[in-house]
Image (tube, coloured by chain):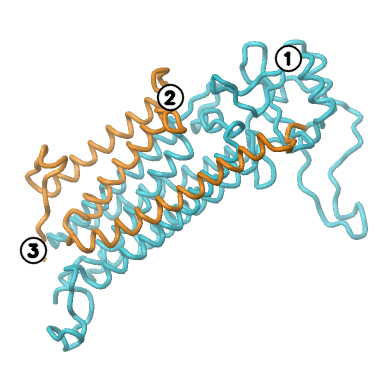
Chain colours: A cyan, B orange
Amino acid sequence: MDNTVVSTGTEGKTWGGGNKPLKASYGKMMMWFFIVSDALTFSGFLAAYGFSRFKFIDSWPIADEVFTHIPFVHDGVSRPMIYVAFMTFVLIMSSVTMVLAVDAGHKLNKAKVTFYMFLTIIGGLIFVGSQAWEWATFINGDYGAVQTKGGNILQFVDTNGERVALRDFAVIDDHKERVQDNRKSGIWFTSEGTLPTYTVSEVLNGLEANENILVRTQIINEEGEKTVLSRAESLKQIKDNGKVVVEGANLHVNEYGSPLFADFFFFITGFHGFHVFSGVVINIIIFFNVILGTYERRKNYEMVEKVGLYWHFVDLVWVFVFTFFYLV
Amino acid sequence: MADHAHKLEILRGLVKFKSNTQKIWGVLILLTIVTAIEVVLGIYKPEAFMAPFLGMKILNWIFIILTIVKAYYITWDFMHMRDETKSLRRMVVWTAVFLICYLIFILLLEGGYVFDVYKEGYMKRDF
């Protein structure tokens, strides 16, 4: 039996099934068509990201200032690209072990298929874990910022242009009256989100007290850097327009700049992460089938090839996500 | 399925591998080199590539071209598109490439237009 489809007894008849006009089995061809449609879905997302970016081309966050961390390293030094390069390499590596598993499958080598499938699953898990960490870092944020009435983000820098965190200069008001409301605060009231650590007035007091701190706006100048305001302008902006303190990023606010950047980041990397996760689950199922000898009895490892196609596709999408979120 | 013939040449026959396994490792090396170039350019951002060209920095064009190179080798060698029939390959690749190019064209053009409206029109966003 040449493929995994059960013999229908109509092989060789033109309309009876069992024909392979493209020399690919039904399952493999359908996996290709699924991949085409899924590729179009991802392209839709990435093109929408491109639309929003072109719409705010002069104020879009600079990725190198957003993703600067490495796990377990807390020295405050900015290291853009390093960790995401590691993630990319892990995914490419797991693609390699997958294709090696497919190759071993062609040779009906059960032990090797098992081994390489196992490595592929491990690679996928490392990648999903890294992505979860990346999300957590992004959500927690770094320096904090103030959002204006118009929704623009004002960040803080010292006179050398180095970023300054709110916690380093805000003057804490011990008598502040606003506390987080709970259910017991009112009859109809149920809950509200966590309040920022500082209020705008605390940030303003801190700014007034520290002569060397300036405000940096979202607008990108000629040199491709964010505009830094003068001392007088800085105070004026925070005093007149500062509305809320923003720490980290979520679907509503984003301390790094346009909230759309955070929305697209969560949505696209989330959708991709979901693909990786489901790929890992499918790989685990196939892994156990290999161990149980299902394909050994079929004398055919095409199932490994089909999940392999899906797994490589996930890698393929990541190559583009990597480019458009971290490089360009 | 012993009849599985693999085409073992990459880079238009410049590099020819002895076995499929060897080709896989060869493609890995190629992809790693391309990614390394991207990362190094992304970290150091050489001044020479910062000039604008067709609406984007030259550096961004380099990134996009390198990405397409990577996508090509993942599809052709890891997904074995090289070994499929010409008609299957065209059904998948041409359809996707055409639709994606069209989508990118209309959305980016529209995005640029909306930017101009915000910028030139009587719209105030700086408050």
Residue that sits furthest to the bottom in the current view = A9
For this rendering, which residue is in front, A267 or A59? A59
Q: Which residue is mark 1?
A: A230
Mark 2 burial class by Cα count in 10 Å: few <14, some 14-19, many 20+: some
Q: Amino acid at mark 2?
A: Ile
On the image, the x and y values in percent for residue B126 come to: 74, 32
User: Distance of mark 3 from mark 2, alpha carbons?
Assistant: 46 Å
- The residue sitting at 30% across, 43% down in the picture is A93
Q: Secondary structure at mark 1?
A: loop
Chain of the residue on which disc 2 is drawn: B
The image quarter containing residue A7 is: bottom left
Q: Which residue is mark 3?
A: B2
On the image, the x and y values in percent for residue A307 come to: 31, 61
For this rendering, which residue is in front, A244 or B55? B55
Q: Which mark is residue B43?
A: 2
Chain of the residue on which disc 1 is drawn: A
| Residue A128 falls left or right of residue A114 | right
Q: Amino acid at mark 1?
A: Ser
Q: Amino acid at mark 3?
A: Ala
